[in-house]
Amino acid sequence: MSKNAFYAQSGGVTAVINATACGVLETARNHADRIAKVYAGRNGILGALHEDLIDTSQESAATIAALRHTPGAAFGSARYKLRGLEENRAEYERLIEIFKAHDIGYFFYNGGGDSMDTAHKVSQLSKSLDFPITCVGIPKTVDNDLPVTDVCPGFGSVAKYIAISTREAALDVRSMSRSSTKVFVLEVMGRHAGWIAAASGLAGTTPAEPPHVILFPESPFDERAFLTRVKHSVERYDYCVIVVSEGAKDQDGRFLAESAARDAFGHAQLGGVAPIIASIIHEHLGYKYHYAIADYLQRSARHIASRVDVDQAYAVGQHAVELAIRGENAVMPTIVRESDEPFQWSLGHVALSRVANREKKMPRSFISRDGFAITPTCRRYLRPLILGEDYPPYRDGLPDYVTLKNAAVPRRLKTDFVLT
Ligand code: F6P
């Protein structure tokens, strides 16, 4: 008997989250005997709570295929965390009401650690409220901090963008260092884990090659050691390229760039550590500097996505549907590394309870003893993830990205839901 499916994108988006959506939708269409229609949540889980569902069956096969090369979140994403069942039962009852009203039997939730927690709670709800729904979390986060899976789709592409940008900007700084800028600071994302900052290390292979300094959230900031390192680089090479993670912390574990703003998950809004680092250098060493905050440029850069990442993003979407059809409930597809060279990988899965709300930081063995560089072990892990290109088609000199119709599913319930 066939049932409808609900699919939602959640949290910060990536260059390849729509490739996962493409994997989900194409695979579901191939199993029309089990999955009648896929309804997407407009703006993530909020779409379910507000009964604002998108009928993906209205999109042509060509449009769905074009999702594979289109960045952003095609259906809209949200940072909204469902609280515990005891704390806010009304939200869960509302979800059940929506699922019942639209004959939904499958729940696919595409996000990071917080989203896997939401997916896990929905699967628990299914048991405690006695409403059968097959629930599969699908991994996605540029932060690469979900445990168990070898890598999180989205990371390989941001890693490639940052490694390329570091290499290119470094050539620029080097060109004028004799008479002008000596220091370039690039700020990258990664709230608690330094995976993206580490990826910049792929730009060079010797100490002379940039980046000369990487600042990880995992290594508390030691101002004196840092300034010594910068001075040494400028004296030796005439310039210094620094890559700093937005999550870099001081010796007491406080973010160097914490602001008072919080998101819906209670996380501090970060961003702005690059100017702090640049001014420390200027104050103590007097060097002329430039800095850049890669911000959304890094996680939207589909034009230079990693082919491995695009393939893996599609594959986890496809596998999620296959797992659900097999009756696997409360699980997340994982990427399993079979070998580094040649790079080979396969797909597995893990219980959501093992990944929800857990963060995978960089292992100590991936960071050099002085805390400012990556180790050969880390390089071996990162290298295959940025391999290959998967250029989108271009029109009039620009990538030709797709926009969906996103037609609304007619509402069946009389009342809207008020978020508390
Ligand atoms: O999703 C992860 C992430 O990209 C983090 O690296 C970053 O700190 C955060 O999202 C930014 O979130 P938002 O776009 O909601 O401000």
Image (tube, helix red, strand yellow):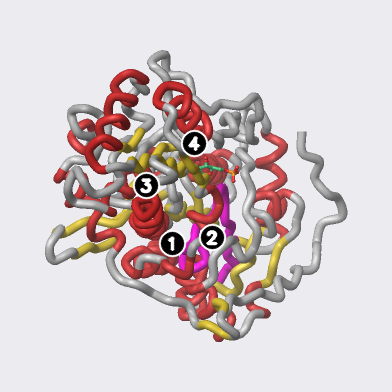
Q: Secondary structure at mark 4?
A: helix
Q: Amino acid at mark 1?
A: Ala
Q: Residue at image x 72%, y 37%?
A: 90
Q: Which mark is residue 274?
A: 4
Q: Residue furthest front?
A: 179
What is the spatial separation of the Cα atoms under label 3 and label 1, in whole angstroms? 57 Å
- Respond yes or no on whether mark 2 lies under 8 Å from ligand 1: no
Q: Nearer the viewer, mark 4 or mark 3?
A: 3
What whole-number distance in Å separates the C-alpha atoms at marks 2 and 3? 58 Å
Tell me how far mark 2 sits from mark 4, CA to CA: 43 Å
Q: Secondary structure at mark 3?
A: loop
Q: Are marks 2 and 3 in contact (CB under 8 Å)?
A: no
Which mark identifies residue 177? Answer: 3
> Ligand 1 within 8 A of label 4's CB?
no
Q: Which residue is mark 1?
A: 324
**Amino acid on which disc 4 is placed:** Ala
Residue 104 placement, left or right of 1:
right
User: Dot 1, how many residues are within 10 Å of its Cα: few (below 14), some (14-19), or many (20+)?
Assistant: many
**Magenta region includes residue 5:** yes
